[in-house]
Amino acid sequence: MQVLALTNEFEEEHFGGAGTAATGMLHMLSQGGVSLLVVVPDSKHKVPSWDVRPGIKILRLPRSEAYFGYLGLADAQKILGEFPELRENWDLIHIHAINFAPLAYAVSEERIPLLYSVYSVLREELGNNPAPELQAQFAVQDELLNKCRRIHLISRDEVNYLSSGFPELLTKIKVVPLGIHPPQVSWSGGKPNNLLYIGRLIVYKGIEDLLKALYLVKQSGRSFTLDIVGKGTEEYENRLKILVQSQKLGSNVRFHGWVTDQQSVAQRMKRSGLLIVPSRKESYGLAALEGMAAGVPLIASNAGGLAELANPACALTFEAGNIGQLVQALNKALDNPALMRTLARNARKRAAVLEWSNLFSKYLDLLTDIN
């Protein structure tokens, strides 16, 4: 099977969960015998480059206005002018990001079927924000959802959202969860009060809820540290740091910025006592899944697709946005390390089912079952 894959993040060019997911998924397909040509922007190079390997070719295009214009949309005419080989008669075009929509349409010419893997429904994730640029991005995604032959969603929660707003799309939807690679490390049993957050620093990730909850936990006399690994806008990071100081958590909370080395992230998980995913919205929750796979005790909200991963049998859970419930979960975890170890063992078994190697047949069906 010959597939053209168009993704905004791949391998070292990744900024979060979408890049991790696309990388794992495409490598799994390639290793399973699917022949891939992957096109991805590259922030480090000023000229296009090819990386040719057995079963997979990668075309890296400079992430610049020369190739990606308004809204970061691919300039299909320029790209196809320079790389006419992208017009091969593919069995399928697999698009992972809306910025490649113009190129997907130009190559497809309504002949080659489009499969769109949706890592987040933007209108839902961003609350249908009225900002003109965001509304333009929403419109691009809406058009892509309508034009593609198959929609790949990663959780049932996303189906619920689309069914309420776009019921005409339901016949095109197929849900297949994201996977992970076998964990690089195993949890070493860190101190129960060494807390860890890993992820983007944005409002709907619930970090402010976590800090407010920890203020109340501290008032109860319990001790802890919280390591925050992730990056956001300078404005929002400053907002979080001001909140830390106002809540008198300066001696408890440490900001580490974005850590690009996955091995370093894995080591942090290994040494932590408790991973916390306090999201108010979450299409899936790869950070939670990676922690579960490593055997790290977990507290997670029930936001979106996260509830499908971290159920009460393998984590302490709380209602998204409910600070009181989060306080209760934190206190329970800090007071009951044996319970957390039991939940973590269950979580590890749950995560093993979702290793990429166990999902290949589902993804092969996804690629081949397109009418």
Image (cartoon, helix red, strand yellow):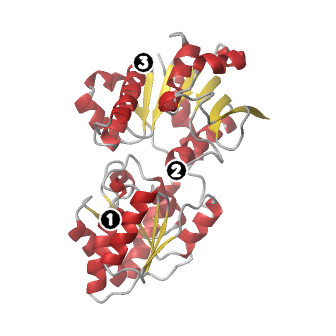
Q: Position of residue 304 (x, y in %)?
A: 32, 48
Q: CA distance from mark 1 to mark 2?
A: 20 Å
Q: Quadrant of the rendered structure where residue 246 is?
A: bottom left
- First of labels 1, 2 by sequence position: 2
Q: Is residue 211 left or right of residue 344?
A: left
Q: Quadrant of the rendered structure where residue 208 is?
A: bottom left
Q: Position of residue 92 (x, y in %)?
A: 57, 21
Q: Nearer the viewer, residue 220 or 341?
A: 220
Q: Nearer the viewer, residue 46 or 270?
A: 46
Residue holding disc 1: 208
Q: Residue at x 36, y 80 (%)?
A: 249
Secondary structure at numbered mark 1: helix
Q: CA distance from mark 3 to mark 1?
A: 38 Å
Do callouts 3 and 1 mark residues in contact (Cβ within 8 Å)? Answer: no
Query: Vertically, is 364 above or below 106?
Result: below
- Crowdedness near tag 1: few (<14), some (14–19) or many (≥20) residues, C-alpha within 10 Å: many
Residue holding disc 2: 16
Q: Amino acid at mark 2?
A: Gly
Q: Position of residue 102 (x, y in %)?
A: 52, 20
Q: Residue at x 39, y 55 (%)?
A: 202
The N terminus, quarter of image = top right
**The furthest residue to the bottom:** 221
Query: Vertically, is 200 above or below 217?
Result: above
Secondary structure at numbered mark 3: helix
Number of marks present in the image shown: 3
**Which mark is drawn over residue 236?**
none
Residue holding disc 3: 147
Q: Amino acid at mark 3?
A: Lys
Secondary structure at numbered mark 2: loop
Asked if residue 366 shows in the view, the reply is no
Q: Residue at x 58, y 61 (%)?
A: 259
- Crowdedness near tag 2: few (<14), some (14–19) or many (≥20) residues, C-alpha within 10 Å: some
